[in-house]
Amino acid sequence: MENTNDLLIEKATELDYKYGFVTDIEQEFANKGLSEEIVRFISAKKEEPEWMLEWRLTAFRQWQRMEEPKWVNVTYPQIDFQDLIYYAAPKKKAKLNSLDEVDPEIRKTWDKLGISNMEQNKLANVAMDFVMDSESVFTSFKDELEKKGIIFCSISEAIKNYSELVKKYIGSVVPPRDNYYSALNSAVFSDGSFVYIPKGVRCPMELSTYFRINAENTGQFERTLIIADDDSFVSYLEGCTAPQRDENQLHAAVVELVAHDRAEIKYSTVQNWYPGDAEGKGGIYNFVTKRGICQGVKSKISWTQVETGSAITWKYPSCILKGDDSIGEFYSVAVTNNHQQADTGTKMIHIGKNTRSRIVSKGISAGKSQNSYRGLVQINKTADNAYNFSQCDSMLMGGDCGAHTFPYIEIKNNTGKVEHEATTSKIGEEQLFYCNQRGIGDEEAIHLIVNGFCKEVFKELPMEFAVEAQKLLEITLENSVG
Amino acid sequence: MLEVKNIHSQIEDKQILKGLSLTINKGEVHAIMGPNGTGKSTFASTLTGKDGYDITSGEILFEGNDLMELDPAERAHLGLFLAFQYPVEISGVSTTNFMKAAINEKRKANGLPPMEAKEFLALMKEKSELVELNKEFLTRSINEGFSGGEKKRNEIFQMAMLDPKLCILDETDSGLDIDALRIVANGVNKLRSADNAFLIITHYQRLLDYIVPDFVHIMYDGRIVKTGDKNLALELEEKGYDWIKESIKG
């Protein structure tokens, strides 16, 4: 009998990506390449106020002076930023008021993505914004939310309609100059979601954005800004897919969260961008800056992410714990198969007193993939009695993949307390045989073991998302065992 | 039920089983005793189809099926069960979920729909009482943080849940204190029926005080060298394994 682990690797190359289709829709593109003109073009397309254009141009000039970072534990060929298209949008652009007005091709796309039935979403209590390439296509339940004073719309709309709010907060958590990709995003971002929850309001439904890359040779640069005012609560979900293409595509998003006094933001991601084929050809470069600030006392920001897609994932959803007694959380499952690479983790920056953070990271590597956890816990001078707990577990399937952990800890206040636990395990033949002996076949056994491994993270996800995440994991690891 | 005909096996290039034969009929309890390293656990792994445990010659028939043609899960579906000497931990998977998967996979293999939740819960309750297993264990990650005794009890619980035809107990008594031993043995005795059979692998006679076997086999150097009734175990206990070694030489 052949060794199970050999079969594991062999079969891992039979991965199937079911979201790899292309929507045939008339689109509008900007010319290839990046210049001040392109930045002006995008801003003009979006009929933005003057300050926004200036902000973009400043970011663009900063970006020009910056260099691509090289410290990450992933390898990829040099990206030619002049060979990308920075704006693509479905052509039919009149404002949509009802679902019936949505382009039938886009509706077909929703069908295939399994998100078509807005009625179903209504039952599940989810309001949805759909962003294809550079444009937000449709936002549901806007009226219902408006009654409570909640703003949930595309960032382009927000820039026009809630200019002051956007102006006050955009770039306040992730300044354009923060890093190479945030500068790039700030210059050319096209769309994304904007959420504002007023004081004392508990958002009655999950807010959700579905990001979809469709066009070829385009970069997707979305920008999301969520503000939770005093004593408010919001749970926000994002899902992502892209067509199957031989070229690599760049996705460089920026997400900023602001939580005021006693406010709570729960941000969940199920990222399933096209990972490339079994030989490592194509796939999305997912270079994202996500950061939240717990501005107010007793505020809380919780990031939950399930990363199954992308050729390369490079992101660290982070929390700046500025308000006293604020809490930051990061729950992550990152799965890599075939030639995928992931370097992901979080930063917890403790500034306020009695701030607490919790990190639970689960990395699963199969095939020839590489999976790194990179995390920073920083306890500043002012952060009396800060506390962090980190747990980083890695699981290896087969002998050709790798798991790496890079925990960085900086403590400048000796009342701080930091606990770190890390484990690496291999889906062992012993575990598989134990399941087999009880009549559970290899495929089902892997699901059971992997889902068990990720349980702590899945339970943080809203119900429907947890089910989707489990399914995604199954698809990603499909046939990864003999 | 089980016919093992003159099997030989090797692991890497070491010969382990050297012409082992054994027949087990419905309703019988067989015990295999023998010193360390004589191939007892290898035999259990071979029967259940662990990776790397193949036979080089001979034949194993289980209810008329050629076992060596089947993968471990298929063998389990036919009604083969192994209570492990060292049950593994599976983090985040509760005994309840594990059993649900096992039962439904078996049902699927037999063309049956998944078991109704109500029926499943009733079964869990009934069987956990059989081995005096605290309900709390059913929701905890399987075997994680369990004591030796708890692990073994959990094995017998699983055995009860799956209602196998042939139950193999691989040194289930090792690491058990007298109370745990009694509970485990009681569980096994309650499961004994005219339709199933047991193969108990053990070093010591102790377990056989509680589970009385119909046949006792003594295994030495990869095969069965002596077969008798329960008195053989007592004799062995008294005279020690050297007696066997001597009698083979003689």
Image (cartoon, rainbow, N blue to C red):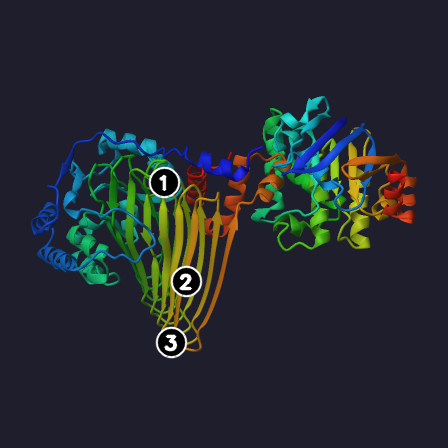
Residue A143: % across, % down: 27, 46
Indicate which disc, 3 or 2, sits on the residue closer to the N terminus: 2
Chain at tag 2: A
- Cα separation, mark 1 vs mark 3, equals 48 Å
Quarter location, residue B8: top right
Quarter location, residue A276: top left
Q: Is residue A147 left or right of residue A372?
A: left
Residue A358: % across, % down: 44, 62
Quick check: do tags 3 and 2 share a chain? yes
Quick check: do tags 2 and 1 share a chain? yes
- Cα separation, mark 3 vs mark 2, equals 17 Å
Judge depth for marks 2 and 1 and give the one in front: 2
Where is mark 2, residue-wise? A407
For label 2, the SS is strand
Judge depth for marks 1 and 3 and give the one in front: 3
Where is mark 3, residue-wise? A412
Front residue of this view, candidates B38 and A333: B38
Residue positioned 32% across, 65% down in the render: A260
Count the marks: how many?
3
Indicate which disc, 1 or 3, sits on the residue closer to the N terminus: 1
Residue B15: % across, % down: 70, 37
Looking at this view, name the residue that lies furthest to the top: B64
For label 3, the SS is loop
Residue type indicated by callout 3: Lys
Q: Is residue A404 left or right of residue B13?
A: left
